[in-house]
Image: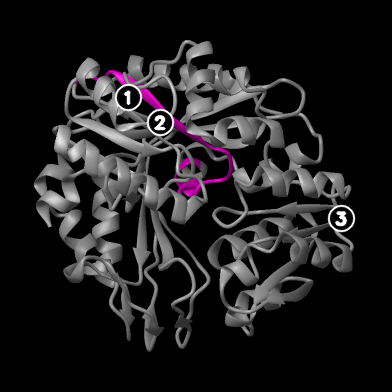
């Protein structure tokens, strides 16, 4: 087992990893930018090293500075968290070439699955359903129009790299397609330095369902059941829950088995997530693999009782998984709500500033993962997420009741947040009944 781990991230996920390491008797080295200097969570690490100025491009995305900090800190491994360099195959390769273990999947699998076109080829090999579309990247307007003619409108233009809704456009006719093709390519080039796009059939009113995977270096690959991530804004998740409220048991089992097949085909290990869209007839289609721990991992931890961060560390250290698929049960219902420093009434515009008052809800069935505190300043440099409010109860009705009670108790003043919107969502009859799709937020609010 590792004696010392560097955490190449910040905020909530850095604190989550520090806590897991402390419980495992592992020392931690935290890195920070000038914008995060003095953050309370840094004091919980055994060592904290500044790696640059506020912009992520000058700190959390600087591979050479993180490796230098790892060498100064004398660590055996690096945990990348999520975001920043977490899915950067080159970073994983550099870590291992420097004899520092990367707590994540092998870089070869990351490389293959990080490119959506390559990932779709692996899905085909694993006999996992794909949305009809182009066989690979589309190189011209003429090729795009031919694909749209073959599969029929509406179609979805998607960047082959990245995520978060960037480089994505819906086209409902030839004019939309021509304009969207250019816009998606330009946006993808700016965001990911890769302008490649492909086209697939746009599934109307879909649900978004993902499967949590966990594998070791000894050939064992398990699924930890599924999460429904349908409630989104701008293609970014707001609410996640497990089990998926509308999936029949047989479909749940099929979608989880499909995810395991795909991961095994890619020679994947450590934690990861296989994402699908599901249509009204419960037919599911592969979208992509997130080769890292997910923001919403607490949902799975609560229903299965498995600590995913500790599992990641043990697997990276070469330990075999000590659990079998038949013993992994999903108990009760867990729901996670992301609370962001954003103004929902103004297009989810970021709302940086100082938290002047903070009262966190508590009581049975409530967990709050966050690094913020009263007096903390939300800066403009990074993601707007303040924290994650998670509830776990015996069934969905009780989970909703607990979430509503927690939101009523929650006090956060000084900045705009998504809490007022969340209160409306959890009281909306369509969401309560599970009658929603990925466009629900935009259509309803």
- Magenta-highlighted residues: 281-300
- Quarter occupied by residue 4: bottom right
Percent of width and height locating residue 112: 60, 30
Asked if the residues shown at circle 1 and circle 2 are in contact, with their CB atoms under 8 angstroms apart, the answer is yes
Quick one: label 2, few (<14), some, or many (20+) residues within 10 Å?
A: few
Left or right, 161 with reference to 311 = left
Q: Nearer the viewer, residue 366 or 146?
A: 146
Which residue, given by chain and number where applicable, does mark 2 sit on? 139
Which residue, given by chain and number where applicable, does mark 3 sit on? 3
* Label ID, residue 119: none
Quick one: label 1, few (<14), some, or many (20+) residues within 10 Å?
A: few
At a point 76% along the width and 29% down the height, the residue shown is 320
Left or right, 3 with reference to 388 = right
Q: Quadrant of the N terminus?
A: top right
Which residue, given by chain and number where applicable, does mark 1 sit on? 143
Percent of width and height locating residue 405: 26, 62
Quick one: label 3, few (<14), some, or many (20+) residues within 10 Å?
A: some
At a point 17% along the width and 30% down the height, the residue shown is 154
């Amino acid at each position: 087992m590792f004696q010392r781990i560097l955490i190449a991230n910040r905020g909530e996920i850095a604190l989550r990893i520090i806590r897991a390491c402390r419980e495992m008797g592992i020392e931690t080295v935290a890195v920070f930018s000038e914008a995060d200097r003095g953050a309370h969570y840094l004091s919980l690490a055994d060592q904290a090293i500044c790696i640059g100025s506020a912009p992520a491009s000058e700190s959390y995305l600087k591979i050479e500075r993180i490796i230098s900090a790892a060498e100064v800190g004398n660590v055996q491994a690096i945990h990348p968290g999520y975001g920043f360099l977490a899915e950067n195959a080159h970073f994983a390769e550099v870590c291992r070439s420097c004899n520092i273990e990367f707590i994540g999947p092998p870089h070869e699998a990351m490389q293959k699955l990080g490119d959506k076109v390559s990932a779709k080829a692996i899905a085909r090999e694993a006999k996992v359903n794909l949305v009809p579309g182009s066989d690979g990247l589309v190189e011209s307007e003429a090729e795009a129009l031919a694909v749209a003619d073959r599969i029929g409108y509406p179609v979805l233009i998607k960047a082959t790299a990245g995520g978060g809704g960037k480089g994505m456009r819906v086209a409902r006719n030839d004019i939309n397609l021509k304009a969207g093709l250019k816009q998606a390519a330009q946006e993808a080039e700016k965001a990911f330095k890769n302008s490649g796009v492909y086209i697939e059939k746009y599934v109307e009113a879909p649900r978004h369902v993902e499967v949590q995977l966990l594998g070791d270096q000894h050939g064992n690959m398990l699924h930890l059941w599924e999460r429904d991530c349908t409630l989104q804004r701008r293609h970014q998740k707001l609410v996640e829950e497990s089990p998926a409220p509308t999936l029949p048991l047989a479909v749940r089992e099929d979608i989880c088995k499909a995810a395991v097949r795909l991961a095994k085909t890619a020679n994947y290990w450590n934690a990861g997530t296989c994402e699908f869209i599901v249509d009204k007839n419960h037919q599911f289609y592969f979208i992509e693999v997130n080769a890292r721990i997910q923001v919403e991992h607490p949902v799975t931890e609560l229903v299965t009782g498995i600590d995913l961060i500790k599992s990641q560390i043990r697997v990276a250290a070469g330990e075999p998984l000590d659990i079998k698929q038949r013993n992994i049960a999903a108990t009760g219902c867990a729901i996670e709500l992301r609370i962001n420093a954003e103004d929902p009434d103004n297009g989810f515009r970021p709302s940086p500033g100082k938290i002047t008052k903070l009262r966190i809800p508590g009581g049975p069935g409530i967990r709050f993962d966050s690094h913020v505190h009263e007096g903390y300043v939300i800066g403009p440099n990074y993601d707007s997420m303040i924290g994650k409010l998670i509830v776990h109860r015996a069934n969905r009705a009780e989970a909703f009741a607990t979430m509503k009670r927690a939101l009523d108790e929650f006090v956060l003043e000084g900045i705009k947040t998504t809490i007022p919107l969340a209160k409306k969502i959890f009281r909306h009859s369509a969401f309560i009944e599970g009658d929603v799709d990925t466009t629900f937020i935009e259509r309803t609010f």
